[in-house]
Every structure is written in structure tokens, then in C-alpha cells.
Amino acid sequence: DAGVIQSPRHEVTEMGQEVTLRCKPISGHDYLFWYRQTMMRGLELLIYFNNNVPIDDSGMPEDRFSAKMPNASFSTLKIQPSEPRDSAVYFCASSFWDSTPEQFFGPGTRLTVL
Amino acid sequence: RKEVEQDPGPFNVPEGATVAFNCTYSNSASQSFFWYRQDCRKEPKLLMSVYSSGNEDGRFTAQLNRASQYISLLIRDSKLSDSATYLCVVDQGAQKLVFGQGTRLTINP
């Protein structure tokens, strides 16, 4: 079975450009999470969805960040305009609600903003 | 105070040694706890859940102390392949997990 799929795997862009990261969760999973990982701050939850509805976006750093989940098999995280401090690895994860909330992570998108 | 705190290490131990990590959490209402493993430049993956009674999975033992709000992971007979970053994870409820910054472990031949 395919795991969580993320694209692109690497993105290098210039400050001020729009960046769109994409995620396809595991089929049948009803939760989707976006995380950001940096050396300084570790793994931070940005936003998560349940059944395509945003549940908690308190981790979104500012208005430059937005996320959507138009259907159960696709989500995007957009940064507009991007800044050098946004450079990080962005992970998408999905899970299925049951007694053990194990999250399955995608391979991540390594974003560099110059 | 961070919600989940870990010693970042690095821990460098010889192959075959026993190594232990601790982690503390701030929310006394937390119910579920986990250890995730992250290899260099890879995604985190669940290593094991942590149960109140303690649990073992091969060479790995996880313990929970609710009174002191700490979680531990013990690795016995360490292998080169155990080299990774170990993330302590606390479930805040509603599927929301909080990750510690991780403890980096290197097993030396």
C-alpha cells in the first residue's frame, strides 16, 4: 500500500515567491496533519484536518500560511509570500481515528527560501 | 516551559551497550504517550506506545511515571542500526500529538 505522498520533495525558491506543498494521505485515513521541522524548534504542528475540515490551525505562524483540504485524498499548504525563515522540512501525516492515534508521515518537502 | 522536554544529546555509545533516555511532559491530563524514531533526513515513524504498566518490544522497554510526569526508553544490546533520533510524543487528545525535540543517538562499532 502507498504511504503518505508529498510533492515536491525539494523546493528552492526566492524570497517573495509563492510556494505550494502537496499531500496525498493514506486512503481511508480521516485525519491529516501538517508539520514543520527545524533544528531550532523541532517538529511543530501547523494545522490539522478531520474529514477535510480544519480542526486546529493555532500552529500556523502567520497569515502568509494557508492550508486547504478540498477532498479526502488531497491537501495543500501554501506560503505566500515566502521568507528565508520559512526554510524547513514540511511533513504531512495522516491517521485513522481508533484507540491508538498513530500518525503516518510522508517523506517531507525540504523547502529552501533564498 | 516546553510541553515535552528531552535531552537532545548526542548520546554516543558502543555497540552492545544499554542506553536510556528520559522525557518529561507538562500536561498532567495527557493520556497517551509514544516514542517515535527518526532516521537522518527521513520522516518520523512510530517505535512504540508507552503504557502505564510499562511495555517491552524486543530490546526496547518503555516506562511511564505519571506521578513525576516522565517517560523513559531503554535500549538493550544496542545495534549500529539503532542510530537515530528518538522523539518523545504526548497525545493531547483529539488526535493532536506534541513532539519533543528528540534525542540523537549514535551507536559506535
Image (tube, coloured by chain):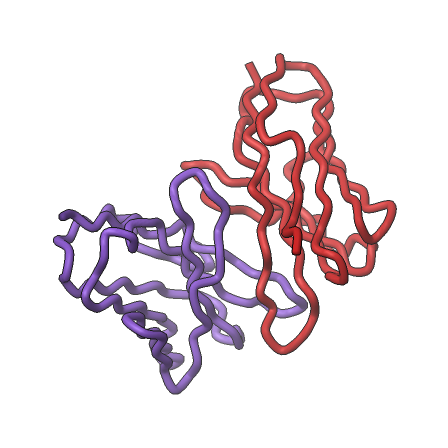
Whether residue A26 is visible: yes
Q: Colour of chain B?
A: purple
Query: Toward which corner of the image does residue A99 lie, by quadrant?
Result: bottom right
Where's residue A10, x and y in %? Answer: 58, 26
Given residues A64 and A3, the one toward you in this image is A3
Query: Toward which corner of the image does residue B100 lie, by quadrant?
Result: bottom left
- Name the residue located 21 percent from the left edge and 61 percent from the top edge: B78
Q: Which chain is red?
A: A
Given residues A41 and A21, the one toward you in this image is A21
Q: Residue furthest front?
A: A1
- Name the residue located 55 percent from the left edge and 14 percent from the top edge: A114
Left or right of B32? Residue B54 is left
Where's residue A12, x and y in %? Answer: 58, 18
- Name the residue located 34 percent from the left edge and 77 percent from the top edge: B63
Left or right of B61? Residue B26 is right
Where's residue A104, x and y in %? Answer: 59, 56
Given residues A68 and B93, the one toward you in this image is A68
Query: Toward which corner of the image does residue A79 lie, by quadrant?
Result: top right
Left or right of A40? Residue B104 is left
Given residues B15 and A91, the one toward you in this image is B15
Where's residue B7, x and y in %? Answer: 29, 53
- Name the residue located 77 percent from the left edge and 60 percent from the top edge: A50
Q: Residue furthest right?
A: A70
Whether residue A86 is visible: no
